[in-house]
Image (cartoon, rainbow, N blue to C red):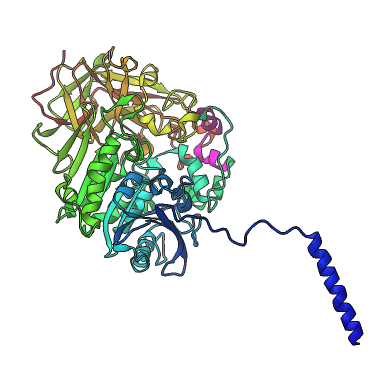
Amino acid sequence: MKKSALALAVLASVVLSAHAQSTLPSETPEEFKAPVDSFDYIKRTVMIPMRDGVRLNTVIVLPRHARKAPMLLTRTPYGADGMTSQSENAQMESILQGYDNQADVIVKGGYIRVVQDVRGKYGSQGDYVMNRPMAGTEFNPTAIDHSTDTWDTIEWLTKNVPESNGKVGIIGGSYDGYLPLVALVNPHPALKVAVPMNPMVDNWRGDDWFHNGAFRQVNLPYILEQVVTRRNDARWFTSTYDDYDTFLRAGSAGELARQRGVEQSGFWRKVLAHPSYDAFWQSQAVDKILAGRPVTVPTLLVHSLWDAEDIYGAIAVYKAIKPNDKDSKVFLVMGPWNHGGQDGDGGKLGPIKFNSDTGLYFREEILRPFLDRYLKDEPSPGALAAQIAPVTAFETGTNKWRMLDSWPASGASGAIAPTALKLGANGSLNLSSAIPAAPGAPAQRNAYDEYISDPAKPVPYRARPIMAVGYDEAKGQTWPRWLVDDQREASGRTDVLTYTTDVLTAPVKISGEPVAHLLAATTGTDADWVVKLIDVYPDQVASQPELGGYQLMISADIFRGRYRESLETPKPIKAGAPLPYRFALPTANHVFLPGHRIMVQIQSSWFPLYDRNPQTYVQNIFHAQPADYRKATQRIYQDSYIALPLVSQGGAQRK
C-alpha cells in the first residue's frame, strides 16, 4: 500500500510539472494599483446608504492637501463617474473640465468636489423616477424623495470626510439644478448654500416637456434614453437627415413615440395620461412647493436669457420664494447665455457678441465670492468685500451688467411701466403709453389680418434641414443656440404675420416679462398661437456685416388655445369667434437701440419643436389621427398688443 501511494504521489508530481511547463502565466495582476501619488487630487468612490437601505454611488474628489475644506455637491442622473473623469489627467481641474462642473471655481477655491448618481441611475441602487414627486403625496406614497436622499447624503458626508469643514453647498444645472431646489424643502443643517442653475421647475408651464400645453416633442429622444435603461444605453435612432421629415411623417407625437418604443418608458405613459395641467404636474411644480416655506439657506438662482430648455424655472422660483426672504438670502443672476452657458466662454452666442466673457465674469465675480462667503470657515477679505447684489442682470443690446435690488426693479434709469406694443394696419407696430382695456369683440370687423395654418406644412422653428437635438457643433448640432437664430426665414412666410415699428431714434428698454394679449379667431376648433418679440438690426452693420437686417428673437412662446379658459380643463374653441388670449413670454432684459426696429411675429405652429395642433378639437392630441389634422384660417385682430415692461428713459421717439 505504501509503495502504491508513493507511486501515485510521484505520478501526480510528474503531471503537475508537465502542466506547469505547458501553461503560460498571466501577465495581468490581481489588482492594478495606479501610481497616483503625483496627482494633485485624491479620488474616492463610495456607496452612501439612504434611510431605506438603498446605496447611492458617490465620487469624492479632494485636493491632495485638503484640510477643513468645504464640499460642493452635485446630484445627477447623468453619471457621476463620467462627470469626474472628463480626462485621464493628474490635474484636478482637467478631470472636472466638462458638463456641469465649474472646474476653475472648484479648484481655485480649494473645494472638495462630490458628485452622486441619483437612485436608479448609473452606479446607484434603487429605482429611477423622472423628477420623483415629493414623498407622502398622491403620486409618491413612499417616504423617499430627492429631499430625503440629499439629507441622508449630507449627513454621511459630514461624518465621513475628515478633510472637510463639515459645510456643504449644492450646485447644478438643468436636472442637476432642479435637485438643489428640492434639497431646500427640508434642508440639512450642514447645507449652507444652494446654486440652482437653469433648473427644471414646472415642466408643463414652461420648462422641458410642455410650454402652455404644447408638447415639446423634440425631447422624445431624451425621454427614451434617460428612462428605459439605468446607464442610458438605449439610443434614439435617426431615420432622416432632417428631423422635420421624421416628425411630420409620423403624424402625432404619440405615434412617433409608439414607433420608437418610447411607450416602454413608465414616465412617457404618465405624460400620455396627463396632457393637461392637472394635479400630476401641479404637485411637482417646484416653485409651488417652495412658495409657502421660509428661506433658510442662501440661494443663488441662475437664469439664462436664451435658454432653449428651461427658460421658465429660475424666474418662477425667484418670484415664489423672494416674498419669504426675510434675511436677504435669495439672489438672482441673469446672463446672456444658452442652457448652461455660464459654465463656459460667455463672450458670444451664435453671431451675437457681448464684448466680454460673461461666463468668466459670473464665475469669478459672482459665483466664487458667493460660495466662499457662506462655505469657508474664514472667507478671504475679497470674498467678504465682494458681497454681490441681490440681482445681477446682464442687459442685452447695451451689453452691460446691472446691479439691482430686486427683479424687475426700477432704478436710476427710470420706472417700469407696462406699455402696449399695438398691432396696426399694413403690418405696422406702435408703442402706446396706455394699456387698452381687456379686448372684447373687435370694434371694426375688418380690422384684422389673417393667414392659413396648414398642419401638413407647419412653420419650422429654425431653418431646414433641422438636425437632431444635440450639443456637438462639429456635427452640425447647434440646438443650444437656436433661440438666437435669424428669424428672417419665418418672416417671409405667408402663414406668419409680421408687424414692425419704424426705425427707433431713441433706446427702448424692457425689463421683465412681455405679455401677449391676442384677440384671435380660427375656423377650426383648436389652435396654437406663437408670439415672438424680435429686435431687427439696421440694414447694414459695418462692424459685423452678417448682422445686417438680422432678426434677433428677444422673447417668444407658444400657447395652446384649448387652455384659454383653464389650464387644467381644455375646451374646444368656438369656430369663427374672436376670443381673447393672454400669456406671458419669457423674461427679457434688453435695450432696442436707436437705428433698430421692433418686430412681432405671430404664427400657429413651431415645428418640430412642438407637436402639431390638429386644429380640430380632440380629447388627447397625443392620440390624434391623420384625419383630425385640418387647415384653418386664423385671424389676428388689431385690438391685439404685447404689454412690454418698459423702463422709461424720457420716451422713445420714432421716425
Inspect this view and state whether residue 585 appears: no
Residue at 36% of width from left, 46% of height from top? 103
Q: Is residue 148 left or right of residue 365?
A: right
* Snapshot quadrant of residue 170: bottom left
Above or below residue 231? Residue 439 is: above
* Left/right of residue 352 with respect to residue 323 in the rendered view: right
Residue at 25% x, 31% y: name it. Answer: 517
Q: Nearer the viewer, residue 250 or 191?
A: 191
Most distant residue in the bottom direction = 1
Q: Nearer the viewer, residue 565 or 185?
A: 185
Q: Please identify the dominant SS of the magenta region.
A: helix
Can you say whether 351 is above or below 417 in the image?
Answer: above
Measuring from the top left, give residue 398's x and y in whole percent. Answer: 20, 26
Report x, y in % for residue 91.
41, 47
Q: Is residue 379 magenta?
A: no
User: Percent from the top left, x then y, of residue 331?
Assistant: 21, 48
Residue placed at 47% from the left, 35% from the top? 469
**Residue 249 sits inside the magenta stretch:** yes
Question: In the image, which residues are magenta?
Answer: 244-258
Q: In the image shown, does 60 or 530 lie closer to the viewer?
A: 60
Quadrant assignment for the C terminus? top left
Tell me which corner region of the image, top left, top right, bottom left or bottom right, holds residue 491: top left
Count the marks: how many?
0
